[in-house]
Amino acid sequence: METAKRKIRSAHIGMKFGMSHIEGAMSYGADIAAICDCDEENLRFAGERYGIPEEKRFTDYHDIVNMDGIDIVTVAVPDQLHSRISCELMRAGKNVLCEKPLALKREDCEEIIRAQRETGMKFMVGQICRFTPAFEKAKELIDSGAVGEIYFAESEYAHDYMCFVDTWRGDPLRHGVIGGGCHAVDLLRWLVGDPQEVFAYGTHRLLPTVEYDDATIAVLKFDENTAGKVFVSTGCKRDYTMRTLIYGTKGTIICDNTSPSMTLYTAGKDGPPHEPQTIEVEVNNHNAAREFEVFADAILNGEPVTTDAVEGAKTVAVCRAIVDSSKLGTPVKPEYDFS
Ligand SMILES: NC(=O)c1ccc[n+]([C@@H]2O[C@H](COP(=O)([O-])OP(=O)(O)OC[C@H]3O[C@@H](n4cnc5c(N)ncnc54)[C@H](O)[C@@H]3O)[C@@H](O)[C@H]2O)c1
């Protein structure tokens, strides 16, 4: 018999991508206590879309910081503000689900970790690819041993930013590898492990008005016998995709975040041909419902959050190492010590 869950009361800051968090909360049956955006038009649009009355709409996020009786606050504002707003919320006794990347600078990642440890509040970074059905299935297959030991894995983040370059996404600090490539890096960290060293090259020809490279290719060394690759393109001329390949000693997985199926090859008994198995998957590359559910359940059940602040910081550390390597022309070891 299912135990009745206590009702979660949520509040939501940032009303563009952040509307997906409202949908996640609604699908969980949460009580939406407040929404916030400093842009009145974006706030009005979200309020009307989700039927949230005017008295629950705020233009200053401090009204949510100071509100009582809130279980979860979701934060979907420009990356540069993640640390400041998340830390204020946790210090005011709020559990926080904050968008990826955790933060753009190491010191801001450390500030979030410190605030979480000092307050004991729960914090989750929205590395949403961990809830994408095809990637969840890939993780399940890997953990079941279906592909044996992984010796090579690659992922990519290919997303045309042409219409975003004049926004906060064009800030040199918000390098495409950190802002968007963090999805592919986090996915490989989750599926394979922490790379010990990276080596990267960057090119710059598609987004001339931004200071950072618009394409980067990074080779990753996980251990002596496991290598990987991440490709990030923020100027590509194609629709958003994160094609991902996992090569193991017993099989191979080919999947992405936008296809209705994925392929699993397992070794033929006497060598090739290796029979491909097509696995149908739901296309849901922003599975905000599952993400909210995992966080809310962790709060209600007093369980740890798997994609916590340290996880987010480790992903940013790899992204930073990739950016540094492409500038320096040498291999770089990510720094994972956040003690
Ligand atoms: N998980 C994903 O796949 C995914 C996809 C898109 C965006 N994101 C992340 O979500 C966050 C938001 O991205 P976006 O695309 O919605 O950006 P956006 O610029 O389109 O929207 C940001 C919203 O936040 C509001 N805002 C800015 N500063 C604010 C403040 N101080 N107080 C209240 N509201 C404020 C803006 O008015 C705007 O409505 C970013 O961190 C981004 O990296 C994640």
Image (cartoon, rainbow, N blue to C red):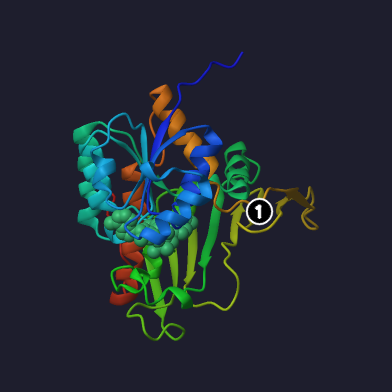
**Left or right: 165 as drawn, with respect to 282:** left
**Quadrant assignment, res 79:** bottom left
* Residue 75 pos. (x, y %): 36, 49
Report if residue 223 is visible in the image. Answer: no
In this picture, residue 44 sits left or right of residue 104: right
| Depicted 43 relative to depicted 219: above or below | above
Picture coordinates of residue 142, whole percent (x, y): 59, 43
Tell me the quarter of the image containing the N terminus: top right
Residue drawn where x is 28% and y is 48% of the image: 61
The kind of residue on which mark 1 rests is Thr
Q: Quadrant location of ligand 1?
A: bottom left
* Mark 1 within 8 Å of ligand 1, using the beta carbon: no
Can you say which quadrant of the picture contains the C terminus?
Answer: top left
Question: What residue is at 29 percent from the left and 69 percent from the top?
Answer: 324
Observer-nearest of 69 and 283 = 69
| Left or right position of 18 against 85 | right
Where's residue 124, x and y in %? 37, 41
Image: 158 above or below 43: below
Residue occupying the far top of the picture? 1
